[in-house]
Image (cartoon, grey):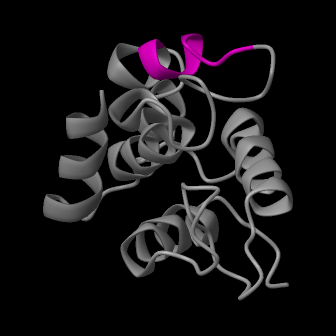
Amino acid sequence: MAVQFQATRDLLQGDGDALQARIATEGDGATLLAAHHADGHWGRGFYRPNWTSSHYTLLELRNLGLDPANAVAGETVRRILREEKREDGGLDPTVTVRGSDACVNGMALNYASYFGAAEE
């Protein structure tokens, strides 16, 4: 579904809104959304385990083209920003490092801005 949406939007310059809406209910987007846990995360939290964590799942949902207004993705982004900020204002997947991680922050800014995180 995501490929159809992206091809329609990017190659055909068409209106892909109907296709984009189906990403949440069909294919990989639906599979990822179904794996979301009642605790508000995927995997075991923000960055555990790496490839099935909330961090990488949000990045993949963003890359698939999930509707930016999706409530599940938006709430998880807000949870991460509330719970995972470090002293310097960035994010870091470890609890032992005092500063944030530039790579993690770059990816998080990508999906956080896409899913409508507030600027502050």
Q: Quadrant of the C terminus?
A: bottom right
Q: Nearer the viewer, residue 120 or 5?
A: 120
The image position of residue 102, as x and y in percent, is 42, 81
Question: Which residue extends farthest front?
Answer: 96
The image position of residue 117, as x and y in percent, is 75, 68
Q: Nearer the viewer, residue 116 or 42?
A: 42
18 is higher (above) or lower (below) than 112: above
Q: Identify the residue shown where x is 73% and y is 33%.
A: 72
Q: Is residue 81 left or right of residue 50?
A: right
**Which of the 4 image quarters holds residue 89?**
bottom right
The image position of residue 75, as x and y in percent, is 80, 43
97 is higher (above) or lower (below) than 34: below
* Residue 6 lies in the magenta-colored region: no
Q: Is residue 108 left or right of residue 6?
A: right
The image position of residue 43, as x and y in percent, is 53, 23
Q: Quadrant of the N terminus?
A: top left
> Which region is colored magenta?
31-37
